[in-house]
Image (cartoon, rainbow, N blue to C red):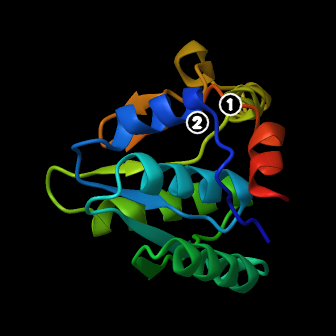
């Protein structure tokens, strides 16, 4: 289980501060190291009004991830909202789960607020590869944007392995 600690770098602090400071936002807490480090950093750099949200897809790993999210939020003394999201039937489970998660987070969002996610350096590359395999055009190959509409991704420049090391996992 991911447990963040105080060794997050100044660069991460600055990126997260830029996404959450003075903004009404929720941190998408998925139960893994990336989002745990994101939440720990957000608490340290801009703690006022933060809350976390976990989306339970009802899939095999959801209960373990939800328990990890609860543990991290309790450890950091951040209110956690647990949302349920139905994953539609069809192919590409990852895409369907992402769509369900995005829909649940957007529906829970207060007007004028943003969602801060723990997408990391490898996530855009994974998105591009997946979209190429699926035959997406050039617009669909762009990867994960650092910010779009209500979505903020301050960890996009950080390698996931470095964040796991910071989280002690």
Task: Give the quadrant of residue 137.
Answer: top right
Would residue 91 be seen by someone viewing this image from the given angle? no
Q: Which mark is residue 38?
A: none
Work out which quarter of the rendered image holds the C terminus and state it: bottom right
Q: Position of residue 86 (x, y in %)?
A: 53, 77
Label 2 CA crowd tier, 10 Å (few <14, some 14–19, many 20+): many
For mark 2, give the secondary structure: loop
Residue drawn 44% across the image and 78% down it:
80
Tally the numbered discs.
2
Residue 158, numbered circle? 1
Please tell me in which quadrant of the rendered image residue 121 appears.
top right
For numbered disc 1, what is the local secondary structure?
loop
- Which residue lies under the disc numbered 2? 155
Q: Is residue 97 above or below residue 63?
A: above
Q: Is residue 88 above or below residue 115?
A: below
Residue 7 x/y as whole percent = 69, 45
* Residue at (51, 64) in percent of width and height: 100
Can residue 30 be seen here? yes
Q: Looking at the picture, does residue 140 appear above or below residue 56? A: above
Q: Residue furthest top?
A: 138
Q: Badge 1: few (under 14), some or many (20 or more) residues near its Cα, within 10 Å? A: some
Decide: is 94 above or below 65: above
Whether residue 49 sits left or right of residue 74 in the image: it is left
Q: Are marks 1 and 2 in contact (CB under 8 Å)?
A: yes
Q: Residue at x 43, y 73 (%)?
A: 78
> How far apart in space, not on screen, are marks 1 and 2 (Cα)?
5 Å
Q: Is residue 58 left or right of residue 60?
A: left
Residue 37 percent location from the top left of the image: 63, 52
Residue in the foreground of this view, choosing between 94 and 8 = 8
Quarter of the image for residue 4 reads: bottom right
Quarter of the image with the N terminus in it? bottom right
């Amino acid at each position: 289980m991911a447990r963040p600690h105080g060794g997050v770098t100044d660069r991460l602090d600055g990126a997260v501060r830029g996404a959450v400071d003075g903004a009404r936002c929720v941190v998408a807490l998925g139960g893994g190291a990336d989002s745990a480090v994101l939440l720990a950093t957000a608490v340290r750099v801009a703690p006022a009004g933060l809350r976390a949200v976990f989306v339970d897809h009802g899939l095999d790993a959801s209960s373990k991830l939800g328990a990890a999210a609860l543990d991290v939020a309790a450890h950091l003394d951040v209110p956690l909202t647990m949302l349920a999201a139905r994953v539609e039937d069809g192919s590409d489970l990852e895409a369907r789960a992402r769509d369900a998660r995005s829909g649940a987070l957007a529906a829970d969002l207060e007007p004028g607020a943003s969602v801060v996610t723990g997408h990391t350096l490898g996530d855009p590359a994974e998105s591009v590869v997946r979209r190429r395999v699926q035959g997406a055009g050039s617009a669909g190959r762009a990867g994960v944007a650092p910010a779009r509409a209500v979505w903020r991704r301050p960890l996009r420049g950080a390698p996931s392995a470095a964040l796991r090391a910071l989280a002690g996992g």
